Image: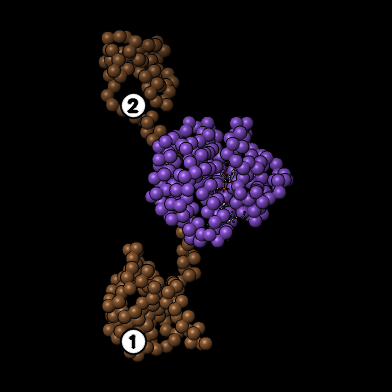
Chain colours: A purple, B brown
Amino acid sequence: MITEALYQEYLSLLLEGNKAGCARIVAKLIADKIDLETLYLALFKRSLYEIGDMWADNKVSVATEHLGTAITEGLMTQAYPLIFRQAHVGKKAVVACVANEYHQIGGKMVADVLELCGWDTYFLGANVPDEGLMTMLQDKKPHLLCLSLSLSTNIGHLDQTIRHVRGQWAKLPIFVGGKAFDALPANVLDAYTHVKLVNSFPDLKAQLLHFGDHRGQ
Amino acid sequence: MASNVDAALIEYLRLHASFLFFLLDKNNNIIGTNQFTAKIIGKDGIGLSFENVLVDFCHPHGLAGFFSRDKDAPLVPLSVNTAEGLPRTFYFMFFDLGDVRAVFGDMDYDEVDKLQRQFILLNGELVNTTRELQKKNVELENALGKVRTLEGILPICSKCKKIRIEGADPRRQDNWLRMEKYIEGKTQAHFSHGVCPDCMDKLYPMMHPKP
Ligand code: B12
């Protein structure tokens, strides 16, 4: 559904900051019944990664990168009417980025995929301080906590957050994912209990299928 | 050598540097600008009064009080009308050069940087709020759908209080449902049965003799 030509057209519109043009493409794809994961991965994620690489190679300015990100986040809202209409399966998840982690789009996509699987999600956004996260966990009593990490240098914050959470919820399942793990050793999460590195949507969905009913008190 | 360097510098500043430059006559009419200024205001501005380039400029002494012969003239934040239609603020310095006047306007790069960071955070909050609202909206729509199932006029038997299924043939007895069954089928409500005092008296007069 997303041909190479369509992707290239979308990317140039995004680089120009042409929100209306991008929105037209997304609206057409939604009308043609594109599935959410394809829209997210083959259009939004691919273009953001490409813009990130262009920025790292000094081919685009940081302002262009910011604009592309802001537009993408706006476009994601176009898909929400589809996401929130799923039948609920009675499970709750809290999704957050740890302190000092300002990359929130990956986490939000995870929250949306969980919604599509019928989960009730609470997406707390970027840079969530531990106190805020703990209050939310207390309040919502979720079955699952998902943490997203893009910067490998934020691994210390992740460690701190997991320790805080474990102080109160010894068995609450925690899924961790994000770009940071491309650059971290595979065993970086081995020290923790009930913490899994889940980095792709198929992997996430497979994990959800085997999910029990414990809330890890 | 030095004059070559100066000339190159001036040429570079005139064509490529990102600051506003206006050369004014004694009446504050524009007689020269640089390339950046032309890009921002959408024209070279020659012949215009400098005040007309500014958005809502209003000062009891006009621009007169701003001009200085001092190299460290104070910075004055003023907004200009841009070609895009959105006002933009520059920090201006006004120099009195005798026969002519020079006005320079620069952006505050720290401010631009701060705004950029704030913009990212605010945008993030805004889109997350939109997500929450969409979620709540669907929940409300679902709840409303449930409430709506009991709207409108219900045909009821005036004797036995059974309710007729909407649109069904009133002559067929199985199209009339007991009220409890009808309401339970249409709402989230359930009935628990008891007997009220009046009926208790009628049904079991011996158990509750009237005083
Ligand atoms: C947009 C962006 C920003 C924006 C983010 C705004 C926002 N609202 O999110 C802003 C401007 C804030 C930003 C800032 C910075 N950024 Co930046 N940014 C990006 C960019 C271009 C896109 C990120 C993105 O949204 N990707 C799309 C999403 C969908 O992908 P994703 O996050 O990987 O998520 C997917 C998976 O990882 C997975 N996933 C993610 N989380 C989770 C969690 C779970 C539980 C599961 C199951 C799965 C999962 O699911 C998603 C779908 O597959 C990337 C480029 C890139 N290649 O990613 C750089 C990038 C991530 N940034 C980078 C850098 C260096 C920075 C800054 C340090 C720059 C600076 N000097 O200021 C700061 C750091 C700020 C901070 N403290 O966090 C580097 C990181 C290098 C590294 N690995 O350490 C990158 C890779 C750019 C580059 N090529 O160098 N950035």
Q: Residues within 10 Å of mark 2 (few under 14, many from 20)?
A: few
How far apart marks 1 and 2 lie (CA) works out to 81 Å
Residue drawn at (49%, 44%) of the image: A4
Judged by depth in the image, the label closer to the viewer, 1 or 2, is 1
Locate the C terminus of chain B by quadrant.
Answer: top left
- Chain letter of the residue beneath label 2 in the structure image: B
Residue drawn at (43%, 43%) of the image: A26
> Is residue B160 in view from this perspective?
yes
Query: What kind of residue is marked 2?
Result: Leu
Query: What kind of residue is marked 1?
Result: Val
Task: Answer with mark 1 or mark 2, whichever residue precedes in sequence.
Answer: 1
Residue toward you, A195 or A150: A150
Q: Give the side of residue B115 with respect to residue B56, left or right.
A: right
Q: Is residue B55 above or below residue B147?
A: below
Q: Is residue B113 above or below residue B129?
A: below
Q: Is mark 2 within 8 Å of ligand 1?
A: no
Quadrant in the picture for residue A28:
top left
How far from the left and from the top, in percent, is residue B73?
42, 84
Residue denoted by label 2 = B150
- Chain letter of the residue beneath label 1 in the structure image: B
Mark 2 falls on what kind of element?
Answer: loop
Number of marks in the rendered image: 2
Q: Give the side of residue A195 with respect to residue B126, left or right.
A: right
Residue toward you, B94 or A176: B94
Residue denoted by label 1 = B100
Q: Is residue A12 above or below residue B38?
A: above
How far from the left and from the top, in percent, is residue B42?
33, 68
Q: Residue furthest top?
A: B172
